[in-house]
Image (cartoon, rainbow, N blue to C red):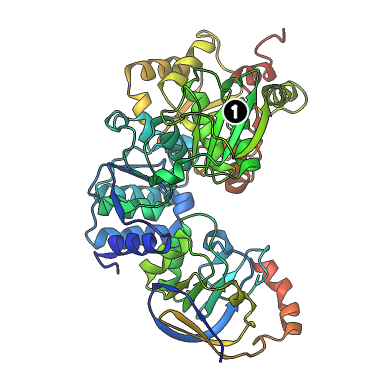
């Protein structure tokens, strides 16, 4: 039994224990702990009790990926039992008014993002979105947990501590990135891992990333910073609205672009030799329109892909004109596209015979979730090479 | 009689046996919710049961799904009777609120040196030591049982 006042009470106690300065209204919320693979039966039971208490979200609330692609669960090898549990979770969330986005990128790539401005408070529970939002959009959110984001969604507010307060948004670490500027999601992901692990700072200042970055690079950096340490925000001149001038009197760290390049290249060189996995997945975080379009341009429209190439994309990207056209072209050459789900927190595919990816984030989570250590690859090109599909030149 | 003062997250009054973990605990993956047994191999109280105990530990760690696990344990009757933390964390705090488990936090780290198996009482913002007893399970017996726990976990 859950008392209807529980969400509000939990937030108030949470605020007091964390030393919050009251509450802030949130513009929207994003809940995690949606895949039955990590929510589990106790989480499901809680959602049942919460829904029974009459709880409903009071601000627009989106949802993280679930454990299945509801449209193609059979070919994914999902069991009927898992599917039923997952569908019940989805139904409960939707009955409380949660929008079925089932995407880890929806908060910043979906249609609601344009309604947010610098300084807006939100309550997001997907850690990669937290870093992307605080950094690239200048919105304010703590790294909420599944339950706290859901309560914030219901109450329409969240305790004002951590990233909601000006004084906590100042960098505690200055990172100088020596040329060459990192390129591509793998190098940016490796950069995020290095900075988060070494720095252990809540907010980091990254100097030397150049004037422009692709969305894929910013997503990979955000995901890695969140995965490998306590970092909730990066500041970078030209790339983030709150960058300001480089901080003084804080800890410093130097990263050499050549080293990132070297690490990425080494991963790629390994791929063409020996027993490279016959599968690759892309889309952790989920692919958006730009990445789908880029991939469709990169691959030959007439050649069927050898090996298994999986792409995880968001429903909002796949339903856009450009995204849907790119997806159509990719499917025609044998690329498998999943929507609404996640390579890490879905029971299938198991990737039991090994898998490649460019996602440094999934490199951390897959061993725990599926017992598989993926092989890092800089691009899909390396995968094609290892499949003997392209000439090495 | 020794006592520790802390801050109240969830108020309550309960007597019980102390179970002290020197390391942070994760309820998701670190505890078997069906039995209440600690299954985290890295834990210094691996194999012990949290059920009905006054669980004393530095802070929570790990997935926020841990809050739901605490709730589930309360429902099936395997939850601790109260939690006492040196440093509060969101996972434990929310878990205790939604499960109505008394919780004290911001207690001096010296609380971690309370002997296993002591009788203690949580009452409002105070943790009282009622009697400083040795652990209820003899160390020899524990050593015998530990491999069994490994097999079935």
Judged left or right of residue A374, residue A240 is: left
- Looking at the figure, which quarter contains the C terminus of chain B? bottom right
Image spot of residue A71 (x, y percent): 37, 34
Residue bearing mark 1: A358
Image spot of residue A173 (x, y percent): 58, 39
**Viewer-side residue, A9 vs B144:** A9
Judged left or right of residue B104, residue A230 is: right
Q: B15 above or below A183?
A: below
* Displayed quadrant of residue A324: top left
Q: A116 above or below A23?
A: above
Spot the residue most to the front.
Answer: A249
Judged left or right of residue B133, residue A52 is: left
How packed mark 1 is, by other alpha carbons closer than 10 Å (few <14, some 14-19, many 20 or more), is many
**Viewer-side residue, A77 vs A42:** A42
Count the numbered circles shown. Answer: 1
Image spot of residue A363 (x, y percent): 62, 38
- Looking at the figure, which quarter contains the N terminus of chain B? bottom right
Circle 1: element type: loop
Identify the residue shown where x is 49% and y is 30%: A219
Identify the residue shown where x is 71% and y is 74%: B146
- Whether residue B134 appears in this view of the structure is yes
Judged left or right of residue A290, residue B60 is: right
Q: A49 above or below B77?
A: above
Question: Mark 1 falls within which chain?
Answer: A
Image spot of residue B46 (x, y percent): 65, 70
**Viewer-side residue, A280 vs B51:** B51
Identify the residue shown where x is 45% and y is 67%: B70
């Amino acid at each position: 039994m859950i008392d209807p006042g529980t969400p509000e009470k939990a937030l108030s106690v949470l605020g007091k224990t964390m030393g919050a300065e009251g509450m802030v209204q949130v513009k929207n919320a994003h809940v995690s702990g949606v895949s039955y693979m990590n929510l589990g039966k106790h989480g499901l039971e809680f959602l049942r009790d919460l829904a029974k208490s009459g709880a409903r979200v009071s601000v627009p609330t989106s949802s993280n990926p679930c454990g299945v692609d509801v449209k193609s669960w059979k070919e994914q090898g999902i069991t009927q039992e898992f599917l039923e549990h997952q569908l019940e979770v989805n139904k409960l969330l939707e009955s409380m008014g949660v929008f079925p986005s089932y995407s880890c990128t929806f908060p910043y790539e979906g249609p609601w993002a344009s309604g947010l401005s610098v300084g807006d408070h939100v309550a997001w529970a997907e850690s990669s979105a937290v870093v992307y939002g605080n950094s690239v959009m200048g919105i304010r959110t703590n790294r909420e947990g599944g339950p706290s984001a859901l309560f914030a969604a219901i109450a329409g507010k969240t305790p004002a501590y951590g990233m909601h307060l000006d004084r906590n948004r100042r960098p505690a670490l200055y990172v100088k990135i020596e040329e060459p500027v990192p390129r591509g999601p793998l190098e940016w992901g490796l950069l995020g891992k290095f900075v988060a692990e070494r720095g252990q700072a809540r907010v980091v200042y990254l100097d030397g990333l150049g004037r422009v970055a692709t969305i894929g690079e910013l997503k990979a950096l955000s995901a890695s910073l969140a995965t490998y340490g306590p970092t909730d925000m990066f500041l970078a001149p030209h790339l983030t609205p709150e960058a300001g001038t480089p901080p003084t009197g804080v800890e410093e760290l130097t990263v050499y672009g050549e080293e990132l390049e070297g690490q990425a290249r080494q991963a790629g060189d390994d791929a063409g030799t020996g027993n490279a996995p016959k599968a690759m997945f892309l889309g952790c975080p989920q692919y958006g329109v730009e990445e789908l379009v880029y991939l469709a341009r990169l691959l030959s429209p007439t050649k069927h892909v050898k090996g298994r190439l999986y792409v995880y994309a968001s429903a909002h990207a796949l339903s856009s004109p450009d995204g849907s056209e790119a997806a159509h072209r990719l499917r025609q050459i044998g690329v498998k596209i999943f929507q609404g789900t996640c390579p890490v927190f879905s029971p299938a595919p198991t990737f039991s015979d090994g898998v490649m990816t460019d996602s440094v984030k999934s490199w951390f989570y897959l061993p725990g979730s599926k017992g598989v250590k993926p092989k890092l690859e800089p691009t899909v090109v390396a995968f094609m090479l290892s499949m003997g599909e392209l000439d090495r030149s | 009689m020794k006592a520790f003062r802390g801050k109240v997250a969830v108020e309550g009054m309960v007597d019980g046996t102390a179970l002290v973990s020197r390391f942070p605990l994760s309820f998701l993956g670190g505890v078997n919710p069906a039995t209440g047994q600690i299954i985290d191999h890295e834990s210094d109280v691996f194999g012990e049961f949290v059920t009905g105990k006054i669980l004393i530990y530095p802070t929570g760690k790990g997935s926020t799904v841990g809050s739901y696990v605490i709730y589930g344990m309360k429902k099936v009757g395997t939850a601790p009777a109260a939690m006492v933390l040196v440093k509060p964390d969101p996972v434990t705090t929310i878990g205790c609120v939604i499960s109505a488990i008394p919780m004290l936090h911001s207690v001096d780290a010296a609380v971690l040196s309370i002997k296993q198996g002591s009788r203690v009482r949580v009452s409002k913002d105070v943790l009282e030591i009622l009697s400083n007893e040795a652990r209820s399970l003899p160390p020899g017996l524990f050593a015998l049982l530990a491999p069994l726990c490994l097999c079935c976990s």
